[in-house]
Image (tube, grey):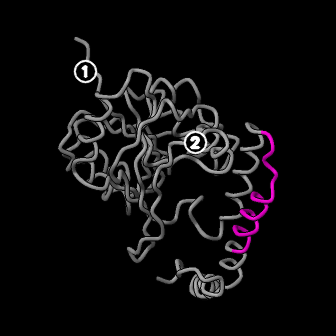
Amino acid sequence: MTATVPFFSIITATCNAAETLPVLLASLSEQHCRDFELVVQDARSSDGTLALLERASGIPAIELLSERDSGIYDAWNRAVARARGQWLLFLGSDDRLSDADVLGKTAELLRQAAAGICFAAGSVRMLDARGRCRFQSTPVLHGGKARLAYEPPAAFPGIVIRREVAAAHPFDTSLRISADYDFLCRTWQDSRAIALPFEVCVMLEGGISSRPENQFAAAWENARVAARHFSGVWTPRRARMLCKAGLVSYAFRLLGRAKAAAFLDAVRKWRGLPPCWTR
């Protein structure tokens, strides 16, 4: 008897994630849509991660494999190869879906979408350790390659991807921070995407690409990825982006979080901009 193919596969890579994983599991267990599986690729966790997953309840199916990998993008590739769902959503172990209807509303829109649609993108909110909103990412599904050469159309945890696309275009494991951006540079087309008019995911600041001290490393790797796929990348706009990211990274590494946040918001105030680091 053939098992039913789930509509969604939620892809998650874990490595000693016992402290944060309960939030993700709780948000998945409360989903009104039950047509999904959770595919976990674990990097031989030595804390309570595996025990949490083994006793998790309220999730229709959990496909768990624990083995050594070379990093998150290798783990994602391995999970994609195991996923059965028609559509994939990549969530961190410290992410959560924004409300109990996210999967249901997404499934309804995807079932109504044209056959050639391969992406659906919604907004993502990032919180700092104190629960304050650090930024809200809203998808922009127009602008084509001219826009994609500088930034992705949406934050990756807010993008639902047709499984065949992800399976045919594995993440580049030689990249440390920007393999998700590289994936979108290779696969994204505005005409094959629809917008989700709601927030998909809430994520916590702290991932390698979201840490303020890593902003320059992320911006530099993004620039190198863009240069792979687009011409005319090294422009004054790119230079300004790298300089801004460098200032943020240097301030946080030199001054520490509290002093760096105060300094950067003082710079913003001098420029006539509202604060974003200390609010």
Secondary structure under tag 1 reads loop
Disc number placed over residue 116 in the picture, else none: none
The amino acid on which the numbered mark 2 sits, given as a three-letter code, is Tyr
Estimate the x, y position of residue 273 in percent, counting from the top left: 58, 80
User: Residue at horizontal 75%, vertical 65%?
Assistant: 240
Q: Determine the CA span between mark 1 and mark 2.
A: 27 Å
Please say if 212 is above or below 202.
below
Label of residue 73 in the image: 2
User: Is residue 151 one of those drawn in magenta?
Assistant: no
Residue 181 spot, x, y in % from top left: 61, 44
Image position of 196 (left or right of 262): left
Left or right: 253, with 21 as reference point: right
Earlier residue among tags 1 and 2: 1
Q: Between residue 80 and residue 230, name the one nearer to us.
A: 230
In this rendered view, identify the residue nearer to me: 49 or 27.
27
Quadrant position of the N terminus in the picture: top left
Q: Looking at the image, which residue is at 32% across and 52% down?
A: 97
Q: Mark 2 falls on what kind of element?
A: helix
Secondary structure predominantly adopted by residues drawn in magenta: helix
- Within 10 Å of disc 2 (Cα), the crowding (few <14, some 14-19, many 20+) is many
- Crowding at dot 1, Cα within 10 Å, few <14 / some 14-19 / many 20+, comes out as few
Task: Residue at 80%, 59% (x, y): give it.
Answer: 236
- Residue 247 location, quadrant: bottom right
Residue at the spot of label 1: 4
Left or right? Give the position of 210 relative to 114: right
> Given the image, on which type of amino acid does mark 1 rest?
Thr
Give the magenta range: 231-247
Q: Observer-nearest residue: 102 or 169?
A: 102
Q: Position of residue 141 (x, y in %)?
A: 50, 43
Magenta residue check for 240: yes
Which sits in the foreground, 264 or 221? Answer: 264
**Is residue 218 left or right of 85 when viewed as pictured?**
right
